[in-house]
Image (tube, helix red, strand yellow):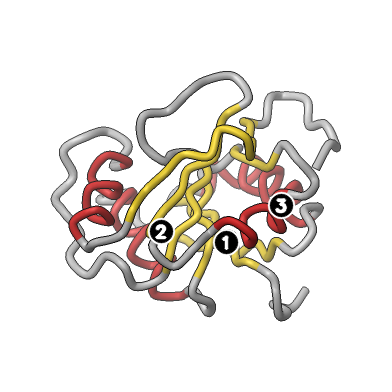
Amino acid sequence: MKLKKGMIEVFLAFYDEGQAQLLLDTANRWIKCKDAYPSIIEVPEQDFEIKRRVLADKLAKNNVYILADILCVPAQPAFISAIKERFKPDIGMVGLGFVDRISEYPSGVRVCRKGVVSKWPIKTTDNYDKEHANAVIMAGKSIDIWQDIMCRELGKQVKSDA
């Protein structure tokens, strides 16, 4: 599969070979999503949350990319087209709504604008979502969570609804 015009890269990061099956399940679901281009990146476990964000931002070929957690997948087939329509130049990062919960900061599936964050803050929370969001705001861009464009976490049973 080759990155074609109109596609958005989806970066999935891992640090442990024990995550291989979960990573494969996640990547296979993203492959089924129209205009998504999954890219798997290996990052050291130490400072994983920061390093995966920095590496995805550096490797992204387009201005907009997705950083997704393992097991976080689209819940709607028109996922990418909806993002492309709404991701305007003043936006630095958007989180998508979860089917089963509400997040305070973009998490799970983050739509990011390449190059917004030039100085990544020190990690003070477990998941680094708050720090990432604040860095985007400090860079002069907005963040948002779109509750109407949904993602979900894969359970033990993989359903084919994307």
Q: Could you say which is closer to the camera, residue 146 or residue 132?
A: 146
**Quarter of the rendering containing residue 159:** top right
Residue 64, which numbered label? none
Q: CA distance from mark 2 to mark 1?
A: 25 Å
Vertical relation: 105 (above or below) 157 = below
Q: Is residue 138 left or right of residue 114?
A: left
Question: Which residue type carries mark 1?
Answer: Ile
Residue drawn at (59%, 19%), measured in percent from left and top?
100
Residue drawn at (74%, 64%), measured in percent from left and top?
35
Q: Position of residue 110 (x, y in %)?
A: 48, 49
Q: Is residue 112 left or right of residue 23?
A: left
Residue 91, which numbered label? 2
**According to the image, label 1 marks what residue?**
40
Q: What crowding class fits label 1: few (fewer than 14 Cα within 10 Å), some (14-19), or many (20 or more)? A: some
Element marked by disc 2 = strand
**Quarter of the rendering containing residue 116:** bottom left
Residue drawn at (24%, 53%), measured in percent from left and top?
137
Q: CA distance from mark 2 to mark 3?
A: 23 Å
Q: CA distance from mark 1 to mark 3?
A: 11 Å
Residue drawn at (49%, 63%), measured in percent from left and top?
88
Q: Could you say which is closer to the camera, residue 76 or residue 46?
A: 76
Q: Position of residue 61 (x, y in %)?
A: 53, 79
- Quadrant containing the C terminus is top right
**According to the image, label 3 marks what residue?**
30
Q: Position of residue 141 (x, y in %)?
A: 30, 59
Q: Could you say which is closer to the camera, residue 112 or residue 14?
A: 112
Vertical relation: 82 (above or below) 3 = above
Question: Which residue type carries mark 3?
Answer: Trp
Element marked by disc 3 = helix
- Quadrant containing the N terminus is bottom right
Comparing marks 2 and 1, which lies closer to the viewer? 2
The extreme top residue here reads: 100
